[in-house]
């Protein structure tokens, strides 16, 4: 008959999955006749089983995005795409308005086909002439070719910063440098 | 298992080429394991999330230095362990790694725990000294081998065995002491 201390060692070994057939047989034999050791074995195996079934915890749903953004791997091309599309549309519309013979023709056709629009246009024209005296310098500069370019640059800058506000970047230095401050931020 | 290993190696190669989808897949494969491990050590959701975050940042930034002959999960757990220890050292007032604190049970656990048995084990686990708790989690929950745990914790296998045996008995003792709900 093996000693209880020896059996306890075998139980631990069995939980480590390191017992051979002979040891396993000896253990079973002892457990069948010893209530205390059997209780110990059952409890330890139940704990082992329970530990294996413990639930998994998960970080917040945006965890992946935050990591990828920190690594600059996130497809942060959205603002670039928008900027390119915006710039393209901007240039196309400017060129269309300046060079297209359709523009003048379309406006003329529209005005002549609708008398009400002609009257409205006249009124706007009168108002524009009235303000003309005041707005002449501005009106002149409006047709300056640099004006659309300035507008274009402004738009790109605006879209860039707007995208940064929408997707703020977390700096890893900030995380490891001052944990207490980070806690305050996270805990609100 | 072989497929999984091959898959990981492919993902690592792709992640090294800055492939976002590969990085995302690696995150999806390991984030809950790393987060659960860290959470069980720290017992604070926000801090555990920060540590997990830093773990993955370190992992991806040093991915080129990863020895492909080694197990990726062991390497990742090693990083997580080191980041956790660094964090605990920096926050000694809140955390005492070699102390017997962390008995407090948080609402977060209650929210997710459904089984009473699991609750008792989780509680008992929290009462274990951190090193023993770490051994139990790595061996029984994460199914790491003694060799892998030895690599992660930089402790000899013989010491791990002794401490693990002691931890199991201690865990059983704590569960016995805890009144049944």
Image (cartoon, coloured by chain):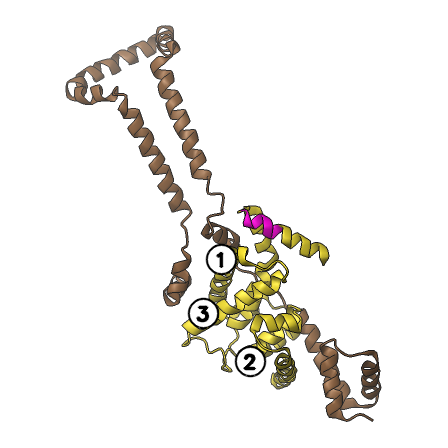
User: Image height check: is B43 above or below A171?
Assistant: below
Who comes first in sequence, dot 2 or dot 3?
Answer: 3
Alpha carbons under labels 2 and 1: distance apart: 30 Å
Q: Residue at x 61, y 56 (%)?
A: B29
- Asked if residue A143 can be seen in this view, the reply is yes
Query: Which residue lies most toward the left here?
Result: A133
Chain painted in brown in the figure: A
**Quadrant including the N terminus of chain B:** bottom right
- Residue B85 or A152: which is nearer the viewer? B85
Magenta-tinted stretch? B11-17
The image's mark for residue B57 is 1
Q: Mark 1 and mark 2 in contact (Cβ < 8 Å)?
A: no
Mark 1: give few (<14), some (14-19) or many (20+) Cα within 10 Å. Answer: some
Instruction: Quadrant for the C terminus of chain B, please.
Output: bottom right
Q: Residue at x 31, y 27 (%)?
A: A149
Q: Chain B hue? A: yellow
Callout 2 secondary element: helix
Horizontal and vertical percent for residue A60? 52, 57
Helix, strand or loop: magenta stretch: helix
Residue B39 in the figure: left or right of residue A162: right
**Lower position in the chain sequence, tag 2 or tag 1:** 1
Disc 3 designates what residue? B87
Question: Mark 2 = which residue?
Answer: B127
Separation of marks 2 and 3 at Cα, in angstroms = 20 Å
């Amino acid at each position: 008959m093996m000693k209880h201390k020896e059996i306890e060692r075998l139980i631990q070994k069995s939980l480590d999955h390191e017992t051979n057939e002979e040891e396993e047989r000896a253990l079973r034999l002892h457990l069948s006749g010893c209530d205390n050791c059997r209780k110990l074995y059952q409890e330890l195996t139940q704990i082992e089983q329970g530990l294996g079934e413990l639930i998994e915890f998960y970080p917040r749903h945006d965890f992946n995005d935050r990591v990828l953004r920190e690594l600059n791997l996130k497809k942060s091309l959205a603002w670039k795409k928008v900027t390119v599309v915006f710039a393209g549309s901007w240039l196309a519309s400017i060129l269309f308005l300046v060079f297209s013979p359709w523009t003048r023709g379309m406006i003329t056709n529209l005005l002549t086909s609708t008398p009400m629009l002609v009257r409205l246009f006249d009124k706007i024209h009168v108002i524009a002439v009235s303000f003309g005296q005041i707005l002449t310098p501005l009106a002149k500069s409006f047709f300056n070719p640099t004006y659309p370019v300035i507008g274009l640059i402004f738009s790109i800058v605006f879209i860039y910063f707007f995208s940064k506000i929408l997707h703020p970047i977390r700096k890893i230095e900030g995380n490891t440098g001052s944990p207490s401050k980070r806690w305050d931020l996270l805990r609100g | 298992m072989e497929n999984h290993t091959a898959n990981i190696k492919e993902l690592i190669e792709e992640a090294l080429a800055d492939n976002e989808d590969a990085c995302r897949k690696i995150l999806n494969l390991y984030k809950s394991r790393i987060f659960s491990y860290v959470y069980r050590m720290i017992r604070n959701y926000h801090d555990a999330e920060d540590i997990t975050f830093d773990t993955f940042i370190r992992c991806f930034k040093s991915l080129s230095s990863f020895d492909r002959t080694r197990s990726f999960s062991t390497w990742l757990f090693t990083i997580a362990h080191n980041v956790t220890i660094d964090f605990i050292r920096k926050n000694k007032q809140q955390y005492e790694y070699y102390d017997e604190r962390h008995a407090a049970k948080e609402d977060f656990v209650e929210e997710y725990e459904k089984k009473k048995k699991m609750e008792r084990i989780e509680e008992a686990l929290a009462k274990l000294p951190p090193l023993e708790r770490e051994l139990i989690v790595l061996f029984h929950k994460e199914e790491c081998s003694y060799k892998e745990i030895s690599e992660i914790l930089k402790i000899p296998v013989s010491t791990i065995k002794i401490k693990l045996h002691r931890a199991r008995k201690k865990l059983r003792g704590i569960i016995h002491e805890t009144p049944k709900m």
